[in-house]
Image (tube, rainbow, N blue to C red):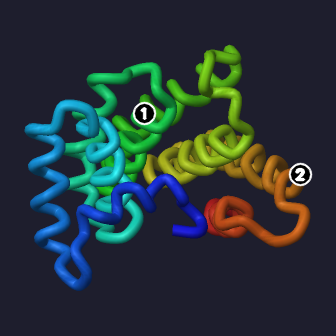
């Protein structure tokens, strides 16, 4: 919760030691709450993507979030991550490219250099997985260059995995 303080307010859904009860309460909130539906949906996306690594379940909530807020970068990113986690490369490319276009067009909410770097990395990965190696090199290189600028004190996962991706492609 130190890294993601917004989760503190929603931790009451997870009684100590009972993950399934917490999920049940979040699902109930998503279906029946008046004011906290979106927040509960975001938490479910985040938990399924980051902790559970259950990309199929994450997709259910990310899709709902994205359909409700198609111009929200978090919604688009969660859905793209769920596709990437499932190896649905074509669908992933469409969403990561959409995010990158909105960043480059300075769409409101998309002015985030970290999101741009992440999009570049995932596009590199998707193109590598689909055998489009020239495109993979292009996006991995851009992600690596951005990482070198952004990561002053330590290396980010995008920096490490972009370099690894370039090595694998070469």
Labelled disc at residue 149: 2
Q: Secondary structure at mark 2?
A: helix
The quadrant in which residue 34 appears is top left
In the rendered view, would you say 75 is above or below 105? below
Q: Nearer the viewer, residue 3 or 159?
A: 3
Q: Nearer the viewer, residue 104 or 44?
A: 44
Q: Secondary structure at mark 1?
A: helix
How crowded pointer 2 is (Cα within 10 Å; few <14, some 14-19, many 20+) is rated as few
The residue that appears at 43% across and 33% down in the rendered structure is: 76
In the rendered view, would you say 41 is above or below 64? below
In 3D space, how far apart are the residues under numbered discs 2 and 1 (Cα atoms)? 25 Å
How crowded pointer 1 is (Cα within 10 Å; few <14, some 14-19, many 20+) is rated as many
- Horizontally, residue 76 falls left or right of residue 121, namely left
Which residue is label 1 attached to? Answer: 76
Asked whether the viewer can see residue 115, the reply is: yes
The residue that appears at 68% across and 15% down in the rendered structure is: 105
The residue that appears at 70% across and 17% down in the rendered structure is: 106
- Horizontally, residue 31 falls left or right of residue 165, namely left
């Amino acid at each position: 919760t130190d890294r993601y303080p917004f989760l503190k307010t929603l931790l009451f859904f997870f009684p100590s030691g009972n993950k399934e009860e917490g999920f049940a309460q979040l699902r109930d909130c998503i279906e029946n709450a008046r004011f906290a539906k979106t927040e509960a949906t975001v938490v479910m996306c985040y938990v399924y993507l980051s902790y559970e690594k259950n990309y199929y379940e994450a997709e259910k909530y990310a899709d709902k979030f994205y359909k409700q807020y198609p111009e929200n970068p978090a919604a688009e990113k969660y859905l793209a991550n769920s596709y990437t986690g499932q190896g649905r490369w074509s669908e992933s490319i469409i969403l990561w490219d959409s995010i990158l276009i909105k960043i480059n067009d300075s769409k409101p909410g998309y002015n985030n250099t970290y999101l741009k770097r992440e999009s570049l990395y995932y596009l590199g990965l998707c193109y590598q997985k689909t055998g489009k190696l020239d495109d993979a090199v292009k996006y991995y290189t851009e992600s690596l260059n951005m990482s070198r600028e952004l990561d002053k004190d330590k290396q980010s996962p995008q920096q490490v995995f972009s370099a690894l991706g370039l090595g694998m492609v070469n």
